[in-house]
Amino acid sequence: MAEENSLSNAQSNTTQINLDASSPYTLHASDNPRIALVTCLLKEENYPIWCRAMTNALQAKSKFGFIDGSITRPSSGSKEESAWIKCNSMVLSLIFNSFHPTLHDSVEFFMTAQELWKDLEEHFSQGNASRIH
């Protein structure tokens, strides 16, 4: 009986969000902050290829909304806020791990994946304007 009450109290004190597999807040067992989603590391000269590869990979994981802004940060203190923070951190890690090591120092202070993505686009797409069809 005491064991049941202890379990019940622990469950009631823990705020959990039940997520289905299609939710952008769902992290799968394969999601790991140390993995690289793409094989081509971002360097100065390969931004268009890298960008397309990362876009595809993040879309496949239902995480591209953290980049394009369609998944906005929930209000402070809401049940969803901690899930958003966790997923945003995962997306930041996935992007960071796809950089060539020489770029690591230039992006370490971004707080959201969307800010980082916009900065990369502004910085690297400038030299590639002639490639846009």
Image (tube, rainbow, N blue to C red):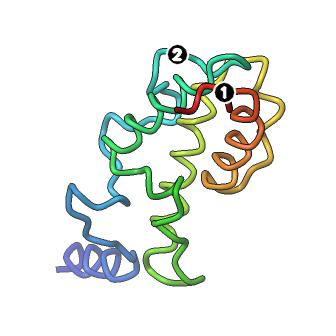
Residue named by callout 1: 130
Q: Residues within 10 Å of mark 2 (few under 14, many from 20)?
A: some
Q: Residues within 10 Å of mark 1 (few under 14, many from 20)?
A: few
* On screen, residue 109 above or below 44: below
Lateral position of residue 84 relative to residue 24, left or right: right
- The quadrant holding residue 45 is top right
- Residue 40 image point, x, y percent: 52, 15
Q: Amino acid at mark 2?
A: Cys
Q: Residue at x 19, y 76 (%)?
A: 4
Q: Marks 1/2: CA distance?
A: 22 Å
Observer-side mark, 1 or 2, equals: 1
Q: Amino acid at mark 1?
A: Ser
Q: Earlier in the sequence, mark 1 or mark 2?
A: 2
Q: Quadrant of the N terminus?
A: bottom left
- Of 79 and 106, nearer the camera is 106
Residue named by callout 2: 40
Q: Residue at x 52, y 22 (%)?
A: 49
- Of 114 and 46, nearer the camera is 46
Q: Residue at x 25, y 82 (%)?
A: 5
- Residue 107 image point, x, y percent: 77, 38
- The quadrant holding residue 2 is bottom left
